[in-house]
């Protein structure tokens, strides 16, 4: 081999040591198998993508709910103690104390299915079957007066259910609605005549540790 | 606004105290408290004290100077001095029904500089802390990709172009208890759902490139391996711009409560999106509208409609000292300090007021000033024991100025829970005790 060819070989070997270009394949990791994807990819979207085959009735859902959910969420989904309520609150979103539940607030039914299947019952997640989940979702709809007592929810009729607050959301508009916060001039001196204390945390007294007055030297 | 940081000390002393003297009507102050009395540093000369008797801390030999201390093996993983036991994360029990879906708070008033020590970073879990064996952990990429892939942690650590970046993480519900008025006495509770960490990892883009995202990809779903199966949708532009997949924090492995062994970093955006215990990223063409982006992390306005996808964290600041848990103990020189941050860019300036927003003084920024990072500010005062109403306001590189709570409420009402970045007021009493208040 000529000397120049040897040098060329060295240059090629060295080039392997350099960083590969941005989108270059690194030969790291492996292809995910379909069974692996199926095991983890349980997510459901509003357009129904990800819904498994299956169905469940309000009646079946009530049974499962009373066994596995009511201890925290209450027999009627009203929420036991400080556990979240899942039903009620319709038409309270403009109230002084809105009651945001699956029925009064959630815009998409797919979210209910997805969330229960991945995270509930609390402390025993991912234990419900597809049919059980359909049944519980049907029961939650019934408790929120969205479907009748004899309703059966399935992959096929899932998209037909309309949630009361479906139209209640819009995309972040802060840069328009709050444009005034991008201020050109800010006041530095004599910005207001008077400063009054309007309210004090101490009056409510909910801070975990109470304090005594400090000593000043 | 940029570039106005030049020697703030100059206009502090000159402008403010002169203006105070000229225009302030002392009788108009609360309970007759003359805030002008709390002058800025330099205005009043400080007298050094003389002791009657010598200090035994100097004249007597303490145990630690006489006897041998612990050897090197006694503390294989060091922890803070036993005198710092009070410096801990704290929670508010009445806030949540269960400790596994709850939050605790960073003790901001005990910290300085910009980096939050790993063990003091606030925690927010929805199903408790997942304790994961890294050898059993996998990251899957699926959906709209050329080739769905699985990576082990060892695979990820062999990626080229490893990066270290400092970013703040703020929970969108930070200060959420304060919408209806001052509630909690302590910046730990009012502002402690924020931390600032140097992360080690790789760009999210480099991981996605291995699977090859399809041209119609618009959103990602990121998913955790915890019992909450936490999921959030992230727009593809953000994912490719500056998001990271990280395994390191502050030079060591992520703490379990911060997502060990793997989490996603979404700079400047609400903390809930920074999914911990990251196990899967799905590529799609629309958002998933999951529970944490519909039921939660949407901002309900007075008219009953809700903003969604309010990802970026607005500029915000808070004076951490003095504050209710860190009262003033001495008259004379005192260091007033605090933190400022913005999810939109870099903090360019912080102003401080000691009279409830009548007059403002530009504070001094110290330490690294980095984009989407906590930024430390100082305002040295000479306190003569007068009452003060302490506030701070942050400015960022987009020209945004931190609004008052009233300005925020006018637009957002009081039921939006999230994104409360209004100006905080601390009422410093004559005895140094400090209280969370709201002022006109």
Image (cartoon, rainbow, N blue to C red):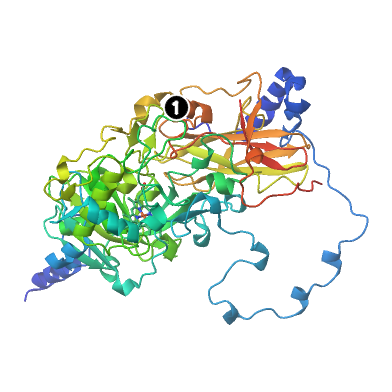
Label 1 residue SS: helix
Residue at 29% in and 48% down: A140
Instruction: Depth check: give the residue in front, A72 or B135.
Output: A72
Instruction: Depth check: give the residue in front, A177 or A84.
Output: A84
Residue at 66% in and 43% down: B322
Point out the residue furthest to the right here. Answer: B52
In the rendered view, would you say B33 is above or below A117?
above
In the rendered view, would you say A28 is above or below B401?
below
Q: Measuring from the top left, give residue B118's x and y in whole percent.
A: 49, 61
Q: Measuring from the top left, give residue B69's x and y in whole percent.
A: 69, 78
Q: Measuring from the top left, give residue B366's x and y in whole percent.
A: 56, 45
Q: Quadrant of residue B343?
A: top left
Chain holding disc 1: A
Residue at 59% in and 37% down: B182
Q: Is residue B88 left or right of residue B202?
A: right
In the rendered view, would you say B326 is above or below B308?
below
Instruction: Depth check: give the residue in front, A195 or B109.
Output: A195
In the rendered view, would you say A190 is above or below B352?
above
Q: Is residue B190 left or right of residue A134?
A: right
Instruction: Depth check: give the residue in front, B338 or A18.
Output: B338
Q: Quadrant of residue B269?
A: top left
């Amino acid at each position: 081999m000529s000397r120049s060819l040897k040098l060329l070989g060295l240059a090629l070997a060295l080039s392997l040591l350099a960083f590969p270009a941005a989108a270059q394949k690194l030969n790291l990791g492996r292809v995910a198998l379909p069974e692996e994807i199926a095991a983890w990819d349980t997510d459901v979207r509003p357009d129904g993508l990800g819904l498994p085959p299956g169905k469940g009735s309000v009646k079946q859902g009530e049974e499962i709910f009373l066994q596995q959910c009511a201890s925290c969420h209450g027999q009627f989904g009203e929420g036991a103690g400080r556990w979240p309520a899942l039903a009620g609150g319709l038409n309270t979103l403009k109230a002084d104390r809105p009651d945001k539940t699956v029925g009064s607030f959630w815009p998409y039914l797919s979210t209910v299915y997805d969330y229960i299947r991945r995270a509930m019952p609390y402390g025993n997640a991912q234990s419900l079957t597809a049919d059980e989940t359909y049944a519980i979702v049907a029961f939650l709809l019934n408790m929120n007066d969205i479907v009748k007592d004899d309703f059966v929810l399935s992959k096929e009729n899932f998209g037909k259910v309309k949630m009361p607050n479906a139209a209640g959301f819009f995309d972040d508009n802060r840069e328009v609605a709050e444009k005034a916060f991008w201020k050109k001039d800010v006041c530095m001196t004599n910005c207001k005549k008077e400063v009054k204390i309007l309210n004090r945390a101490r009056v409510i007294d909910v801070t975990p540790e109470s304090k005594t007055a400090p000593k000043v030297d | 606004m940029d570039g106005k940081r030049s020697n703030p000390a100059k206009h502090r002393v000159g402008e403010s105290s002169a203006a105070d003297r000229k225009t302030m009507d002392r009788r108009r102050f609360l309970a007759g408290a003359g805030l002008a009395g709390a002058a800025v540093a330099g205005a009043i000369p400080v007298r050094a004290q003389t002791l009657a008797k010598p200090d035994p801390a100097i004249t007597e030999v303490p145990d630690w100077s006489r006897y041998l201390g612990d050897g090197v093996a006694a503390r294989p993983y060091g922890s803070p001095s036993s005198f710092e036991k009070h410096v801990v994360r704290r929670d508010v029990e009445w806030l949540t029904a269960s400790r596994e879906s709850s939050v605790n708070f960073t003790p901001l008033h005990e910290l300085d500089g910009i980096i939050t020590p790993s063990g003091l970073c606030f925690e927010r879990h929805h199903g408790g802390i997942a304790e994961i064996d890294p050898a059993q952990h996998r990251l899957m990429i699926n959906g709209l990709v050329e080739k769905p892939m699985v990576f082990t942690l060892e695979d990820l650590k062999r990626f080229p172009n490893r990066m270290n970046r400092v970013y703040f993480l703020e929970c969108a519900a930070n200060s959420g208890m304060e919408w209806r008025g001052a509630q909690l006495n302590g910046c730990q509770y009012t502002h402690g759902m924020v931390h600032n960490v140097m992360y080690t990892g790789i760009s999210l883009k480099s991981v996605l490139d291995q699977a090859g995202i399809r041209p119609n990809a618009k959103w990602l779903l990121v998913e955790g391996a915890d019992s909450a199966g936490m999921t959030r949708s992230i727009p593809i532009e953000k994912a490719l711009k500056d998001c990271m997949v990280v395994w390191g924090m502050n030079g060591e492995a992520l703490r379990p409560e911060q997502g060990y062994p793997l989490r996603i970093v979404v700079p400047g955006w609400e903390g809930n999106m920074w999914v911990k215990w990251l196990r899967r990223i799905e590529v799609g063409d629309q958002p998933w509208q999951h529970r944490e982006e519909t039921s939660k992390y949407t901002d309900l306005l007075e008219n009953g409609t809700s903003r969604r996808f309010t990802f970026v964290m607005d500029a915000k600041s808070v004076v951490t000292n003095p504050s209710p848990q860190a009262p003033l103990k001495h008259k004379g020189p005192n260091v007033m300090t605090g933190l400022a941050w913005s999810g939109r860019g870099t903090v360019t300036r912080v102003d401080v007021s000691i009279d409830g927003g009548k007059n403002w003084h530009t504070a001094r920024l110290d330490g690294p000033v980095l984009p989407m990072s906590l930024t430390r500010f100082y305002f040295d005062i000479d306190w003569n024991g007068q009452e003060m109403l302490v506030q701070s306001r942050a400015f960022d590189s987009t020209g945004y100025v931190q609004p008052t709570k009233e300005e925020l409420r006018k637009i957002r009402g009081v039921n939006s829970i999230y994104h409360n970045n209004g100006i905080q007021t601390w009422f410093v009493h004559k005895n140094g005790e400090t209280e969370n208040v709201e002022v006109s």
